[in-house]
């Protein structure tokens, strides 16, 4: 993620383009990634929970790899990696989302609506604020990494999702959205487009899953 599991690339001599252009490029990639996620969840709806869990770990590993392998954050390879990650994540989430859609569709609707509102609100605030929030990238990234790691360990031992973990992921992901959109407005260049799109996409998914876990009452 652009800021989820690592920092942005160091200072580079890059030509700036308009913020409007960058915003359009980033959100276009986010939209396509969400489309791949939706296709993956549809294709993976009949997978076993065990298979879905393995695929989710693969997706997690892809994000870690992107954080440390610079070519995975740029150009055609970076775009392919983002869309591949979104598809595999969708496959992994397929069985879970299928369960919620059939057993508690109201929770799915509430989570989707809440995600849209939070994304719009955090994005608007991050874009509008005059403060430079880039110093929060690393602390929030490490905080979310720690929370997600705890959540994955809980799943491995079959303890399920904790409402406290869901709330923590929700809050941290919302804050990361603010920082991402603030960075996009103030400092981003074309080299940051894929990196930012990945971070915003992952934050949106995290917010949706956290709200789904909270609204479903299965904790």
Image (cartoon, rainbow, N blue to C red):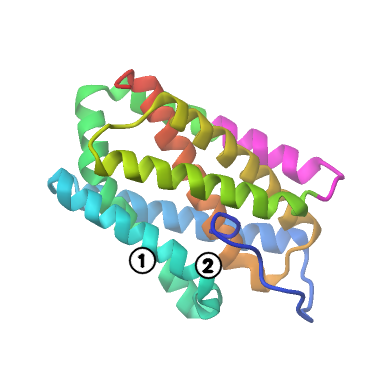
Residue at horizontal 25 percent and vertical 30 percent from the top: 101
Q: In which quarter of the image is residue 74?
A: bottom right
What x and y, as percent, mark residue 119? 58, 38
Can residue 180 be spotted in the picture? no
Rendered-image quadrant of the C terminus: top left
Residue at horizontal 12 percent and vertical 46 percent from the top: 48
Q: Is residue 32 left or right of residue 22?
A: left
Can residue 156 be spotted in the picture? yes
Q: Give the range drawn in magenta.
A: 117-132
Q: Farthest top residue? A: 217
Q: Residue 4 has which mark?
A: none
Q: Residue 67 has which mark?
A: 2
- Report the Cα–Cα distance between label 1 and label 2: 15 Å
- Mark 1 crowdedness (10 Å alpha carbons): few <14, some 14-19, many ≥20: some
What x and y, as percent, mark residue 144? 53, 45
First in sequence, mark 1 or 2: give its number.
Answer: 2
- Front position in the image: 189 or 211: 211
Residue at horizontal 45 percent and vertical 58 percent from the top: 32
What x and y, as percent, mark residue 130? 87, 45
Compared to 103, does 64 lie above or below?
below
Q: What element carries label 2?
A: helix
Q: Is mark 1 on a helix, strand or loop?
A: helix
- Observer-side mark, 1 or 2, equals 2
Compared to 36, does 111 lie above or below?
above
User: How would you classify the magenta stretch by its main secondary structure?
Assistant: helix
Residue 131 lies within the magenta run: yes
Q: Which residue was labeled with disc 1?
A: 84
What x and y, as percent, mark residue 216? 33, 21
- Front position in the image: 178 or 21: 178
- Mark 2 crowdedness (10 Å alpha carbons): few <14, some 14-19, many ≥20: many
Residue at horizontal 34 percent and vertical 31 percent from the top: 161
Compared to 100, does 14 lie above or below?
below
């Amino acid at each position: 993620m652009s800021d989820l599991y690592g920092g942005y690339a160091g200072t580079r001599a890059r030509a700036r383009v308009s913020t409007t252009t960058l915003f359009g490029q980033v959100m276009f990639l986010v939209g396509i990634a969400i489309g791949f996620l939706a296709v993956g969840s549809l294709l993976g709806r009949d997978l076993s929970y065990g298979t879905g869990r393995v695929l989710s770990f693969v997706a997690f590993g892809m994000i870690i790899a992107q954080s440390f392998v610079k070519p995975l954050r740029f150009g055609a390879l970076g775009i392919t990696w983002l869309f591949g990650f979104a598809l595999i994540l969708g496959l992994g989430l397929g069985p879970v989302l299928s369960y919620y859609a059939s057993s508690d569709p109201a929770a799915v609707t509430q989570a989707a609506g809440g995600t849209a509102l939070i994304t719009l609100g955090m994005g608007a605030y991050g874009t509008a604020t005059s403060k430079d929030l880039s110093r929060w990238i690393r602390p929030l990234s490490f905080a979310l990494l720690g929370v997600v790691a705890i959540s994955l360990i809980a799943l491995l031992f079959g303890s399920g999702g904790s409402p406290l973990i869901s709330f923590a992921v929700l809050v941290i992901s919302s804050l990361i959205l603010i920082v991402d959109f603030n960075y996009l407005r103030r400092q981003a260049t074309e080299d940051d487009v894929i990196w930012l799109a990945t971070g915003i996409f992952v934050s949106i998914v995290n917010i949706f899953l956290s709200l789904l876990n909270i609204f479903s009452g299965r904790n």
